[in-house]
Image (spheres, helix red, strand yellow):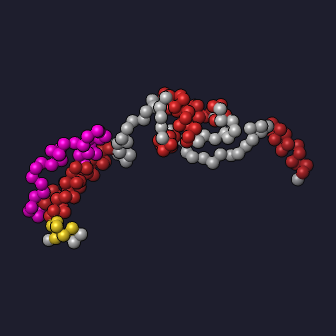
Amino acid sequence: MRVPTHPERTLFDLVQHVGMARRKSATIVAAGPSDAPPEKSAWEDGTGAPREREALLTWWTESIEQLTSALREVGPKGPSGSDCRLSDAQLQALAATLDEGPAAHGYVEDQRWTLARVAELIVRLFRQRYTLRGVSLLLHRMGFSPQVPKHRPVERDEEAIATWRREVWPQAK
């Protein structure tokens, strides 16, 4: 039987192609991140898909189970590709530095941490370069989330505000 979207292929060809793709994917996922793909012999035994119907269905089901098992094994996040370039101690130091606020690091005119500023800070502190997207992912992994800052003047006097609320505001009501 021919496949309508690929007239040059039979239904058997399509089943074999998809089954082999699943087997290859399962092997790659199970191997984890590497510079080169696994050898073809790791997922293909040279015989291909069997032609007999029941054996083909078994082979097809096994390919699904292999891929599902490999994906379950690596967990929901999967292999991330590369490890973080900062050590745990450097991540803690970065978090403490960010908690000090932008003003403590020379950004007095606009006291907000932007991705560009954090990237610059990482270069200054640890001599590691990150893209803006990389900084965003790093901050998210550290538990930071994007925030819209409250605009408060640097000269804000909390004590004077508390006094005004306590003494002047009740009279103004």
Where 126 sits versus 154, above or below? Answer: above
Q: Is residue 145 magenta?
A: no
- Counting from the top left corner in percent of width and height, residue 73 is at 30, 44
Say which quarter of the image contains residue 15: bottom left
Determine the residue positioned at 50% across, 40% down. Answer: 135
- Counting from the top left corner in percent of width and height, residue 3 is at 19, 69
Where 78 sits versus 97, above or below? Answer: below
Left or right: 11 with respect to 36? Answer: left
Task: Count how many numbered circles sit on residues in the image.
Answer: 0
Determine the residue positioned at 9% across, 52% down. Answer: 47
Main SS, magenta residues: loop
- Counting from the top left corner in percent of width and height, residue 91 is at 50, 32
Where 25 sits versus 97, above or below? Answer: below
The N terminus sits in image quarter: bottom left
Determine the residue positioned at 8% across, 62% down. Answer: 52
Left or right: 24 with respect to 155? Answer: left
Q: Is residue 64 visible?
A: yes
Left or right: 92 with respect to 61? Answer: right
Q: Is residue 31 magenta?
A: yes
- Counting from the top left corner in percent of width and height, residue 119 is at 53, 37
Q: Is residue 63 visible?
A: no
Say which quarter of the image contains residue 87: top left
Segment colored magenta:
26-54
Determine the residue positioned at 22% across, 58% down. Answer: 18
> Most extreme residue toward the right, as rendered?
171
